[in-house]
Amino acid sequence: MVQRPEGLPSPDRVIELLDGEFTRAGYEIEDVVVDTRTSPPTIRVVADGDVPPDLAAVSELSRAASALLDSLNTGSAPYLLEVSSPGVDRPLTAEKHFRRARARRVEVTLGDGAVVTGRIGAVGDGVVDLVVRSGSGWTVRRLPLTDIRTAVVQVEFSPPSAAELELVGGTADTEVGA
C-alpha cells in the first residue's frame, strides 16, 4: 500500500469535501485518485452529469475544489489538482452512463462474448435500446444491462443517418458526440 504524504486527504475525504459543491453545480463526482507517485502528488477528480461538463464548467469546478481543498490543513504538502470529465474512452458501466451517452455510437461486448456496435437509444429499468444495422436498414435491439460485459463509446467522424436518429429518438438537430 502506498503511503499518502502527511496532510494530503484520502479520496473519500476529497469526495466528502467536494460533493455538495459539485452537486449544486449539477455534477457528481465519478472518481477521485490521490496519486502520490508524481511530484508533487496529484489529486484527480472526475465529474460527470446529465449534461457533461464543458471547459467553462470544469474551470469553475476546479476553482471551487481548489478553494475547498485549500481550506484543509495539508501542512507543507504541495499537490496538483486536476478536475476533468470522464472522457470518451471511459467504459459505460452504469445505467446513468448509458443514459448520458444517448445517441452516441458504442461497441458492446455481451456476456456470451458477442460484439455488437450500435447507437444508444432509450435507457431505463435496466435495459438499453441499441439501434443496430439490420440488412439495408436499422432496427432496435433491447439489451438488459446485466447482459453487457463492456461498452465503450466510439469516436465518429460523420453524422448518423436520419433513419438511425429517428430510432434513437433524436432529430437531425440532436447533438451527437458532444
Image (cartoon, grey):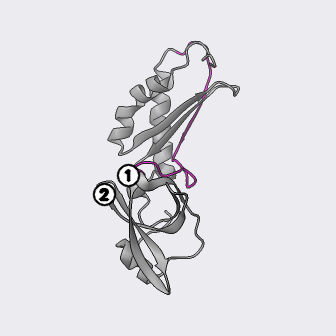
Q: Split into 4 quadrants, where in the image is the N terminus?
A: top right
The alpha-carbon separation of the residues under discs 2 and 1 comes to 7 Å
The reply to whether residue 173 is visible in this rendering is no
Residue 56 relative to residue 141: left or right? right
The reply to whether residue 110 is visible in this rendering is yes
Does the magenta portion include 147? no
Q: Observer-nearest residue: 4 or 40?
A: 4
Residue 158 screen position, x and y as percent: 57, 76
- Tell whether label 1 touches label 2 (CB within 8 Å): yes
Q: Dot 2: within a 10 Å radius of its alpha carbon, few (fewer than 14), some, or many (20 or more) residues? A: few
Q: Observer-nearest residue: 40 or 123?
A: 123
Q: Which residue is mark 1?
A: 95
Residue 82 screen position, x and y as percent: 57, 37
Dot 2: what SS? Answer: strand
Q: Which residue is mark 2?
A: 124
Residue 174 relative to residue 151: left or right? left
Residue drawn 47% across the image and 74% down it: 132
The residue positioned farthest toward the left in the image shown: 125
**Number of numbered discs:** 2
Q: Is residue 25 above or below residue 99?
A: above
Residue 4 screen position, x and y as percent: 60, 17
Residue 175 screen position, x and y as percent: 44, 69
Q: Is residue 76 above or below residue 34?
A: above
Q: Earlier in the sequence, mark 2 or mark 1?
A: 1
Q: Amino acid at mark 1?
A: Glu
The residue positioned farthest toward the front in the image shown: 112
Q: Dot 1: within a 10 Å radius of its alpha carbon, few (fewer than 14), some, or many (20 or more) residues? A: some
Q: Observer-nearest residue: 7 or 148?
A: 148
Q: Amino acid at mark 2?
A: Gly
Q: What kind of secondary structure does the magenta stretch mostly adopt? A: loop
Q: Is residue 105 above or below residue 77?
A: below
Q: Which residues are magenta?
A: 74-97
